[in-house]
Image (cartoon, helix red, strand yellow):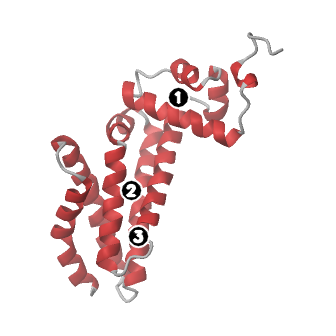
Amino acid sequence: MTSTTEPVERRKRMPRAARKAQMLAVAEEVFAQRGYLAASMDEIAEQVGVSKPMLYEYFGSKEGLLVGCIHKARTELREATEQAVVGAANAEQMMRLGLLAFFRFIAERRQSYSLLRQEAAVTVPSAVQEIEGIRRQQTDLMIGMMAAYQPDAAPVELEAAAEVLVGSCERLAEWCERRCDISPEQATDLLMGMVWTGLSARLGD
């Protein structure tokens, strides 16, 4: 018979990758609800069902756990964007689908996005690089997607267009958060209407 005093993590064995994913999911929720500074490793460990030392074994520190959450979001955003544009018929449709995927991702994880954009950037220096990595990732994705549809466009034009789009997405997402009445579809339509004509002219669509 299993002893009731046996550590939780020994009674509920789980593959390391699955356990790490569980820790990140719980941590993201706690950080979003309480804020990074107010959240405690004790609370996160308790909700996961592991000991606090085990949490430190996986991530090293609360800061490391937050960076892990940001990296997880970064990976999921990349996957959502890439999947959304599969089968796009032309550059305009590709861009629309990619923008819509971004705004839907942000809308579905509004609390977490607010945490990453505001508190993490201010209070956790190591998170700044990871947050910038999200911007760089989206810029590189956009460059690659536009180049696939417009192979003759000059690299400098593609890079500038990608920077404009990513910067616009970030600012528009913040505006949508303040408004609370703009859907991902509306945000996509607004941004496409404002930038597509200029971009398509510059890139020779």
Residue type at mark 1 is: Lys
Mark number displayed over residue 135: 2
Nearer the N terminus, badge 2 or badge 1?
1
Q: Is residue 101 above or below residue 111?
A: below
Residue beneath the point at 53% across and 28% down: 62
Mark number displayed over residue 173: none
Badge 3: few (under 14), some or many (20 or more) residues near its Cα, within 10 Å?
many
Residue bearing the label numbered 1: 62
If the image is split into quadrants, where does the N terminus sit? Answer: top right
Residue type at mark 2 is: Arg
Looking at this view, name the residue that lies furthest to the right.
1
Q: How many numbered marks have been drawn onto this rendered protein structure? A: 3
| Alpha carbon separation for disc pair 2 and 3 | 18 Å
Does 129 sit left or right of 175 as displayed?
Answer: right
Q: Is residue 194 above or below residue 29?
A: below
Which residue is nearer to you in this view: 20 or 39? Answer: 20
Nearer the N terminus, badge 1 or badge 3?
1
Q: Is residue 130 above or below residue 95?
A: above
Badge 2: few (under 14), some or many (20 or more) residues near its Cα, within 10 Å?
some
Residue beneath the point at 31% across and 65% down: 163
Which image quadrant is residue 122 in? top left
Residue bearing the label numbered 3: 85
